[in-house]
């Protein structure tokens, strides 16, 4: 029996998540651009809140988009494998008690929180089934996979095809016994945290960025204008409102988040972990350089 490949519907979910990311990014960019030109006061605070609140969900939706893009279901004579981003669940077929459509339930399934197309993810409790974990993208194609541990809710593009393949594989029997495996995204973070070097780089970058935010917030109200921008020899020193200093902690924080996530991506493989430490070290160095840049700006006489 060949491997059965039953991916979930992705197109609608990718469009929805892509539009959300685009809208949030546009609002965030507009907020930060206006923030850098606003004088200290209510307008400055308003643009700051708008920029931060619009940026905060971007990593969340970006990971959901990546997870949906990589999502897949595989079944063979030995196991059913569910891949959803960094979440992996390998279930031996012998551990599967039954498989049926969610439409067969007397009590309908309650969808997880934030049930966006392409992102039906999370854990719920059902009065008949107990703990139910959603790893699905389409509420109209939900398929229940029951094990002794919990019930998994998936959404293959062809639910009946997956059910029929499962029935045939069960009849034919397993060729090679496999072990159940559960991998969660938090596992990568926990594994990396056990490394002393990773902890040092993470905490150093965190404290540098916190310090930069606090320092900039103290400088902006007390210093009306600073020298920032292109300066030419013999020319007049150009100054700008000190509120533009917010660019430094914001840019530093954004790069630190991107670097942290990229490092976790590489850390999943033993052979790529050197790249993870290089990325995290570069992020820490970049945060330090932003701190020195602010020091250079405020020490330049205006």
Image (cartoon, rainbow, N blue to C red):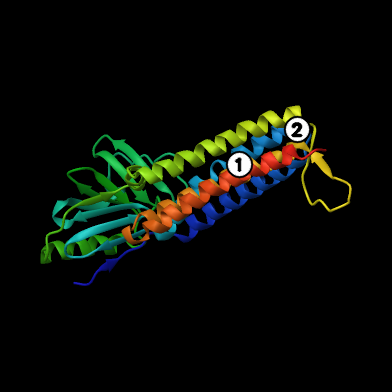
Q: Is residue 1 above or below residue 280?
A: below
Taking the spot 58% from the left edge, 34% from the top edge, the residue there is 211
Query: Which residue: 12% across, 64% down?
Result: 176
Image quadrant containing the N terminus: bottom left
> Is disc 1 placed on a helix, strand or loop?
helix
User: Dot 2 surroundings within 10 Å: few (below 14), some, or many (20 or more)?
Assistant: few
Q: Is mark 2 on a helix, strand or loop?
A: helix
Give residue 131's quadrant in the image: top left
Inspect this view and state whether residue 114 appears: no
**Which is more N-terminal, label 1 or label 2?**
2
Front-most of residues 72 and 60 = 60
Residue at the spot 52% in from the left edge and 36% down from the top edge: 207
Mark 1 closeness class: few <14, some 14–19, many ≥20 residues within 10 Å:
some
Q: Mark 2 points at which residue?
A: 43
Asked if one can make out residue 270 in the rendered structure from this viewpoint, the answer is: yes
Q: Spot the residue most to the front.
A: 234
Q: In the image, is 126 to the left or to the right of 279?
A: left
Q: Is residue 9 left or right of residue 47?
A: left
Mark-to-mark CA distance, 2 and 1? 16 Å
Asked which quadrant contains residue 3, the reply is: bottom left
Q: Name the residue under label 1.
A: 54
Q: Where is residue 212 in the image (x, y as percent from the top left)?
A: 61, 36
């Amino acid at each position: 029996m060949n491997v059965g490949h039953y991916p979930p519907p992705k197109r609608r979910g990718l469009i929805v998540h892509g539009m959300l990311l685009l809208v949030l990014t546009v609002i965030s960019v507009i907020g930060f651009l206006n923030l850098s030109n606003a004088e200290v006061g209510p307008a400055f605070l308003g643009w700051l809140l708008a920029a931060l609140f619009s940026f905060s969900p971007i990593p969340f939706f970006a990971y959901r988009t990546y997870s949906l893009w990589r999502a897949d279901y595989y079944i063979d004579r030995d196991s059913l494998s569910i891949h959803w981003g960094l979440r992996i669940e390998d279930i031996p077929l012998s551990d599967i008690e039954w498989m049926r459509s969610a439409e067969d339930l007397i009590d309908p399934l309650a969808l997880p929180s934030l049930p966006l197309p392409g992102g039906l993810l999370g854990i719920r409790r059902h009065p008949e089934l107990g703990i139910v974990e959603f790893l699905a993208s389409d509420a109209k194609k939900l398929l229940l996979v029951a094990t002794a541990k919990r019930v998994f809710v998936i959404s293959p593009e062809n639910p009946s095809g997956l059910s029929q393949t499962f029935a045939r594989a069960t009849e034919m029997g397993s060729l090679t016994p496999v072990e159940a495996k559960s991998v969660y995204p938090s596992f990568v973070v926990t594994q990396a945290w056990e490394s002393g070097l990773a902890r040092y780089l993470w905490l150093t970058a965190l404290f540098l960025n916190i310090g930069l935010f606090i320092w900039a917030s103290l400088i902006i109200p007390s210093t009306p204008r600073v020298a920032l921008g292109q300066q030419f020899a013999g020319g007049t020193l150009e100054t700008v409102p000190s509120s533009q200093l917010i660019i430094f902690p914001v840019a530093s924080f954004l790069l630190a988040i991107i670097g942290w996530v990229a490092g976790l991506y590489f850390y999943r493989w033993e052979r790529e972990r050197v790249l993870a430490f290089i990325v995290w070290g570069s992020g820490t160095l970049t945060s330090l350089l932003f701190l020195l840049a602010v020091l250079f700006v405020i020490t330049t006489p205006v």
